[in-house]
C-alpha cells in the first residue's frame, strides 16, 4: 500500500519569531510555487512552540505546509495554568499535534494513561496526532525494546483516531548523534506495524505511517527512508536549519515508492 512520506519538524523550545518566519519563507521559496510544497509528493508539517504558532501560521498562510502543536491538555478548557487545549490549537491554525514525546514523558512525568487522554482530546478537535514512543538505552540493553514499544502502543491504540501517525523515537538516539541503524529502525517499525495488524486490523496497519526520529540528518535520511516500513521523519535538531530540513524533505521525496 502506498503511504505518502511525511517530513515533520519538531522545533522543541527553539527559535524566535523572526527566525521562524525566515525558515518558512525559505521553504516557500524553494519549490518556486509558494502555494505548493517545496518537494512534490510528500507531506510536511512544522511543530513550533506555542508562542510561535501565530507568526508561523501567518508565514505559512496559503501554502501546503501544515502546522501543529507540540502538546495539548486532555481536557477542552479549564483551570490548567501553562497548558494548551485542543480547541486553542485548532483556533491558532493547527491541523496536527505531537503527543507523548519522550521529553514530555521525562520532564513532565507523562504516563501512558495521560497520553491516551491526549489522543482522545486530539480526536475531539480533529487534530491529527503523531504519537511518539521509543525505548531508553537501558531498556534496549536489557532486551526490553519490544516490550516497551508494545506497552506504549497498546495503551494508545484504543484512544487513537484512524488518521494517527506513530513516530518511533528511541530515546538514546534523540539529540545524541547516535542514530538508529536502518536495520534497527526497520526492525522496530516492522514490529509496530505487526502489533497494529494484530491489535487493530491489517488494513489499519497497512495504512499507518510510521516515522523515525532520533538524530536524523541529511546524510542518513536516504538510507533510513529506503527501509520498507519507514514512512518519514520527525526531525529535531536538523529541522532548525531550513537547508538541512529541505535536504531531508528531498530524501523523502526521492525515496517514494
Ligand atoms: P533530534 O533530531 O534532535 O535527535 O530530535 C529528535 C526528536 O526528538 C524529534 O521529536
Image: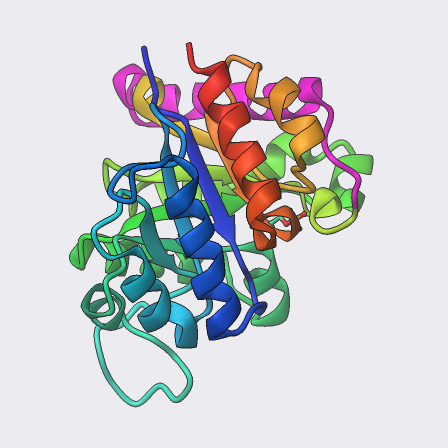
From the viewer's side, name the closer residue of 51 and 111.
Answer: 51
Report whether residue 147 is seen: yes
Magenta region, main secondary structure: helix
Is residue 194 inside the magenta stretch? yes
The spot of residue 220 in percent (x, y) is 69, 27
Spot occupied by residue 216 in the image (x, y as percentages of width and height): 65, 37
Way the structure is coloured: rainbow
- Residue 131 placement, left or right of 124: right
When the figure is inspected, residue 107 is found, relative to residue 202, above or below; the finding is below
- Where residue 200 appears, as percent x and y from the top left, is 30, 27
Tell which of 209 and 63 is nearer to you: 63
Q: Quadrant of the C terminus?
A: top left
Q: Residue at x 18, y 59 (%)?
A: 125
Q: Residue at x 46, y 37 (%)?
A: 7
Residue 164 position in % (x across, y down): 31, 39
Residue positioned 17% across, 57% down in the render: 124
Question: Which quadrant, please, contains the N terminus?
Answer: top left
Segment colored magenta: 177-204
Residue 40 sits in quarter = top left
Residue at 48% across / 72% down in the picture?
18
Q: Quadrant of residue 120?
A: bottom left
Total residue callouts: 0
* Residue 46 left/right relative to 213: left
Q: Can I make out residue 192 in this image?
A: no
Q: Is residue 100 magenta?
A: no
Relative to 175, 104 lies left or right: left
Amino acid at each position: 500500500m502506498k503511504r505518502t512520506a511525511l517530513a515533520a519538524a519538531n522545533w522543541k523550545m527553539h527559535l524566535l519569531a523572526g527566525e521562524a518566519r525566515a525558515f518558512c519563507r525559505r521553504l516557500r521559496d524553494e519549490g518556486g510555487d509558494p502555494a505548493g510544497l517545496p518537494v512534490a509528493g510528500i507531506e510536511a508539517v512544522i511543530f513550533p512552540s506555542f508562542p510561535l504558532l501565530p507568526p508561523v501560521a501567518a508565514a505559512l498562510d496559503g501554502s501546503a505546509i501544515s502546522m501543529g502543536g507540540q502538546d495539548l491538555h486532555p481536557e477542552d478548557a479549564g483551570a490548567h495554568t501553562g497548558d494548551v487545549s485542543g480547541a486553542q490549537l485548532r483556533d491558532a491554525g493547527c491541523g496536527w499535534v505531537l503527543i507523548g514525546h519522550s521529553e514530555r514523558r521525562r520532564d513532565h512525568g507523562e504516563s501512558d494513561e495521560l497520553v491516551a487522554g491526549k489522543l482522545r482530546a486530539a480526536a475531539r478537535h480533529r487534530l491529527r496526532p503523531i504519537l511518539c514512543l521509543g525505548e531508553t538505552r537501558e531498556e534496549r540493553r536489557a532486551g526490553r525494546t519490544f516490550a516497551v514499544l508494545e506497552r506504549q502502543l497498546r495503551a494508545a491504540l484504543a484512544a487513537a483516531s484512524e488518521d494517527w501517525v506513530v513516530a518511533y523515537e528511541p530515546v538514546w538516539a534523540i539529540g545524541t548523534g547516535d542514530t538508529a541503524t536502518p536495520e534497527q529502525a526497520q526492525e522496530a517499525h516492522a514490529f509496530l506495524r505487526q502489533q497494529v495488524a494484530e491489535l487493530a486490523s491489517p488494513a489499519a496497519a497497512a495504512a499507518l505511517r510510521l516515522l523515525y526520529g532520533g538524530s536524523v540528518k541529511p546524510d542518513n535520511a536516504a538510507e533510513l527512508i529506503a527501509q520498507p516500513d519507514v514512512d518519514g521523519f520527525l526531525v529535531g535538531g536538523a529541522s532548525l536549519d531550513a537547508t538541512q530540513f529541505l535536504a531531508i524533505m528531498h530524501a523523502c521525496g526521492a525515496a517514494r515508492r
